[in-house]
Amino acid sequence: MGFAAAIFIGVAAILLPAAVVLCEFPASLKLERAFPSNHGIQLSQLVARDRLRHGRMLQSLDGVVDFLVEGTFDPFVVGLYYTKLQLGSPPKDFYVQIDTGSDVLWVSCGSCNGCPQTSGLQIPLNFFDPGSSSTSSLVSCSDKRCSLGIQSSDSACSSQTNQCSYTFQYGDGSGTSGYYVSDLLHFDMVVGASMIQNASAPILFGCSTLQTGDLTKSDRAVDGIFGFGQQGMSVISQLSSQGIAPKVFSHCLKGDDSGGGILVLGEIIEPNIVYSPLVPSQPHYNLNLQSISVNGQAISVNPSVFATSSNRGTIIDSGTTLAYLAEEAYEPFINAITNAVSQSARPVLAKGSQCYLITSSVTEIFPQVSLNFAGGASMYLRPQDYLIQQNSIGGAAVWCIGFQKIPGQGITILGDLVLKDKIVVYDLAAHRIGWTNYDCSMSVNVSTTSSMGKTEFVNAGQLSDSSSHQNEAYNSILSWTLIGFFIHITIQRTFQFL
């Protein structure tokens, strides 16, 4: 929910350290049962115990995890992308929207006020019950993870209940509140020539007891939101701190009608990628936008308009469908586009948006736009990256500017309209974001660093949502040494407003 996805790994072999006993032989070791023989144990308890052990094992193994993602990028159909997660013991399915504009994973919990009961996406909605999971525990105020969340405004604490809680308000006016729990996140992982099924890792996530605004609506309802932000409470930060995932992720979002793309917990390698440094100490992915050029000519806007402050700045947010310009830059941008096409397109206003009637190809008429960032990195936009086709009138196609303005706001937000058909790398370790134009229907090379300091590469191709095709994809990469996560996603987008 921007201001609001398959993953894979391979190694030749897994080496487990042998125990060395430094004593004279014969030696006598007393073995005791973890569970007494006369004590009846539920199978679920044994499974839960094994899962905890597997979680500890994962801390020494770099693997690839596959999250099946569903939905569509088309804002007129679904307008969001989501994935199915398994949480708790025994595992329970939850469909959650993937959101790079927020930090926390949360799901609806029992007795939730305002939580939808059904979904127009034809997916079953579930409610998490901490009491029904044998590995679940509440998070107290004294938990260091709660303290970490307080620093980033992702958590709060009640002295009356000693319970770590949260309240979030999203850019579209919706909101949620609840409390934190700690439990297992389940996934399948490919390590070496083996696929480890039912692997798990302990994470902290939110248990929603109240939802408001659009979150209460059933037409596009999901079980929660999967935050991919950079703060310590995000799942990517938690998995990275456990040594399971690298502190870099990338995506390449297909811009055609079918959607799709690749989301990688790892660094996509492409020679033409340019990088710009992240603005430090910001809650979102902020960059220093310095100027905007149309047909190679910078529009007349004071650079201070784009400077980062408490109510200004430029944010990269793949959870936002369109793009938004600071109010002072909006009219100069529109005027520059209109002047560039004055001989070939007829400008019209449609519901407050600047649109154009054209009878030939949009790529032949409209100019290239470049967004110029600190570090000498420019993002080049084709007409399809700043225009949206609406309909046709009398044989003429209607194309409208996809950039919007937020009255009274100095925020610039670059959403999927701009980010599609590009590799975008979020290098949190190096505090930078990189990009290049790319055909996202093609495979990509991903680089990660192994525990021995060696850089490894893998060719991450397109993977089918079907399990049979996924198995074929698994088999095709088992000879590679992989460190990282590769997430193949079907892209969906959401309209988000501040």
Image: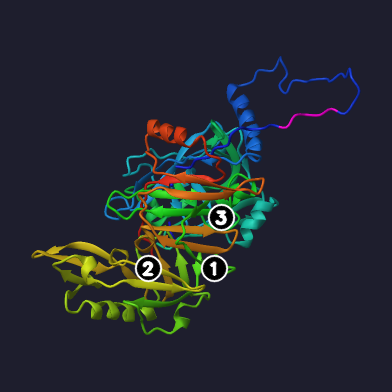
Residue 109 position within the rendered picture, expressed as x and y whole percent measured from the top left = 49, 43
Q: Residue at x 18, y 66 (%)?
A: 398
Name the one closer to the observer, 167 or 73: 73
Residue 226, position as x, y percentages in the image: 48, 50
Using the rendered image of the protein, determine whether residue 343 is visible from the camera's viewpoint.
Answer: yes
Pick the quarter of the image with the C terminus. bottom left
Q: Earlier in the sequence, mark 1 or mark 2?
A: 1
Name the image quarter holding the N terminus: bottom left
Residue 349 in which image quadrant: bottom left
Residue, disc 1: 277
Circle number at residue 262:
none
What is the chief secondary structure element of the magenta stretch?
loop
Identify the element where label 3 is drawn: strand
Residue type at numbered disc 2? Tyr
29 lies left or right of 254: right
Q: Secondary structure at mark 1?
A: strand
Eyeballing the image, is 408 above or below 463?
below
Which residues, given as a range, are shown in magenta? Answer: 17-21
Disc 1, disc 2: CB below 8 Å? no
Q: Visible in this render: residue 3? A: no
User: x, y (%) of residue 133?
Assistant: 57, 34
Q: Is residue 455 left or right of residue 261?
A: right
The three-letter amino acid code for the residue at tag 3 is: Tyr
Q: Which residue is mark 3?
A: 166
- Verify CB contact (< 8 Å) between mark 3 and mark 1: no
Count neighbours of disc 2 (C-alpha within 10 A) and say few if under 14, some if 14 to 19, many if 20 or more: some
* Residue with the mark numbered 2: 380
